Amino acid sequence: MLNYIWAGMILLGVIYGVCTGQMSALTGGALDSAREAVSLCITMAGVMALWMGLMEIAQESGMIAKMTKGIRPFLKFMFPRLPEDHPAGEYITTNLIANVLGLGWACTPAGLKAMEQLAELEKQRAGQGTEKGRQGSEDRRYGAEATAASNEMCTFLILNISSLQLIPVNMIAYRSQYGSANPAVIIAPALVATLFSTIIAIIYCKWKDR
């Protein structure tokens, strides 16, 4: 769908440029935007490489595992049916930490791994429900919804979208790239906005998970 939307926008721009005799401006704008995009990608690649490297070091050194234990009460509260020491817990922790630091790109790999682990957990539950047959309504529900997203997957997705951010690193880098006089001025507003969005996300998840 997005491909069609972008293609339609480009086509409309070209048609408008031809009809209004502004093809030279359209061509110049396209070239300038391409150059600016490359420059921005180089800047953001450096920022992402730095923070993703730090996150990888933290994971290999065991810091993420310790943080997982530290926020286990929160994970238990948000994911009450997630088994202790399940691999998804560490990936969820890594993702949440990256989000708190405002590293939207850096949290993506951990988020994908967490979803894979949660999907695998749901498949195991569905398999157990099928084997047990009609022994309980809970088992039949798992068997019937083997292809549906679990409560844990939905909760994790909503928390990821709400994304509490203490330091919006990516946004600060964007503002710095485009010449902002004070790129870090958005820290306080971003913290307040994401704090409220996260609180609302938690309330919504617990209400739907009841």
Image: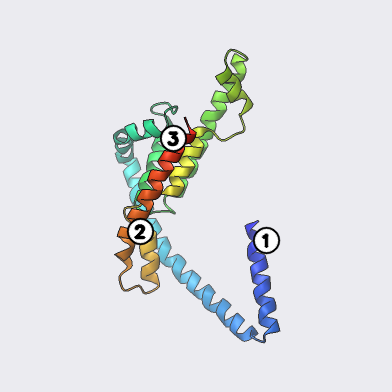
> Total label count?
3
User: Dividing the picture into quarters, in which one does residue 91 lie?
Assistant: top left
**Earlier along the polypeptide chain: callout 1 or callout 2?**
1
Q: Residue at (65%, 84%) from the top-left corner? A: 23
Does residue 22 sit above or below 186 in this rendering? below
**Number of residues whose C-alpha sits closer than 10 Å to that of mark 1, classed few (under 14), some (14–19) or many (20 or more):** few
Residue 169's disc number: 2
Which type of secondary structure does the marked residue at label 3 adopt? helix
**Earlier along the polypeptide chain: callout 3 or callout 2?**
2
Position in image of residue 193 (x %, y %): 37, 54
Which type of secondary structure does the marked residue at label 2 adopt? helix
Position in image of residue 208 (x %, y %): 49, 35
Question: Which mark's residue is nearer the viewer, 3 or 2?
Answer: 3
Which type of secondary structure does the marked residue at label 1 adopt? helix
**Number of residues whose C-alpha sits closer than 10 Å to that of mark 2, classed few (under 14), some (14–19) or many (20 or more):** many
Q: Residue at (70%, 83%) from the top-left corner? A: 19
User: Cβ–Cβ below 8 Å for labels 3 and 2?
Assistant: no
Amino acid identity at mark 1? Tyr
Position in image of residue 182 (x %, y %): 30, 70
Q: Quadrant of the N terminus?
A: bottom right
Residue 206's disc number: 3
